[in-house]
Amino acid sequence: MAKKNQNVYQNVIKSRIMVLKKMKLDIWKAERLQKLAKKASVDGPKQPRAPKIIKTGLTAAEEVTLVHQLAAQQGGLDKHGYITIMPSEREIETARKGLESSQGWEQCDRCTTRFRVFPGRRAEDGALTSGGTCTYHWAKPRRPPTAKGEKPRDLVFACCEQTLGTSTGCTKADSHVFKISDPKRLALVMPFKHTPVSERADIPGAVCFDCEMGYSTMGMELIRLTATAWPDGREVLDVLVRPQGEMLDLNSRFSGVWPADYAKAIPYSDPSPESSDEAASLRIVESPTKARELLFELLTPATPLIGHALENDLNAARILQPEIIDTALLFPHPRGLPLR
């Protein structure tokens, strides 16, 4: 009943908060341990889920032949955030002048606060950004479900269930961060490159591709690149990437990349690891450009590149690839964009 009636729900929550405020620490600990033990006994130890095997009735060779038919047409991809035309030198120079005149002022991608960025650190105090801490909601607002005939409820943030407009945020970060989406500015940080024609590419089918991004003083940068062969699912590349700017936030909640991963990472050029600890560590390359070069060794312009919302990954790696298969375009969300 409380979940269906907003007033009842609020009263229940307020009562629970009052109980918790008056509760002694040792009682609270005992209660939490009891609930955790009960949950563990019901759920049992978590087992990794086996990958779902999809049987198409086709041979691998037939699947490879068919997959080319799923490639997106290049015309109109710009409406979905894809960059299909290389920014010109003139456009890049315009972006350079604009960046110089802005004197490092950006808008936070999380809380929209205006702040300054100091690549290379500010001389007087070594700061990377101005503006202090960032308070934000890490999830988007959504409308809670209602019973039939009930009035639509106010939008709430999925991260904390707080009503839209009543809270500045539920999460704090040490720094504000920013993201670049303009092709000219992206090219200013790292030039775009067409997938080269290569005779070294040894993937006979397609390549599945995914990138993870974090926030640096250069914007949102590539911090991990992963690729698998299709249709056999064989891993062909998985590397951490050292960004060009100083790191502000690894965006670990979404990227899955943590400071410990960088601390334990092994240089990509090192020989194969001998110990089990080394085998569990990721390899790291010194720049996004190097990660892109490694991916290019697996591709040709005619190799289908498969992924979900591929424009984000391609833009992060600054790749122009004509043959792409984007599941966000093939299987659009029933409620339409921006959901996917």
Image (cartoon, helix red, strand yellow):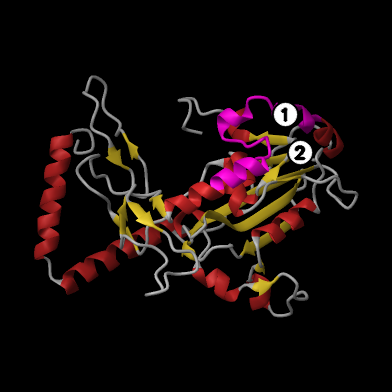
Circle on res. 304? 2
Residue 166: x, y in percent? 19, 43
Relative depth, front residue between 232 and 219: 219
Residue 204: x, y in percent? 85, 44
For the N terminus, the image quarter is top left
Relative depth, front residue between 215 and 157: 215
**138 on left or right of 28:** right
* SS of the residue under disc 2: loop
Residue sitting at 38 percent across and 75 percent down? 124
Q: Is residue 63 above or below residue 112?
A: above
Residue sitting at 45 percent across and 25 percent down? 335
Label 2 near label 1: C-beta < 8 Å? yes
Residue sitting at 63 percent across and 37 percent down? 83
* Mark 1 / mark 2, whichever is N-terminal: 1
* SS of the residue under disc 1: helix
Decide: few, some or many residues near mark 2? Use Cα within 10 Å; few <14, some 14-19, many ≥20. Answer: many
Q: Amino acid at mark 2?
A: Pro
Residues shaded magenta: 66-95
For this orientation, the residue located farthest to the bottom is 275
Check disc 1 and report the residue beneath it: 70
Q: Is residue 12 above or below residue 260?
A: above
**187 on left or right of 40:** right
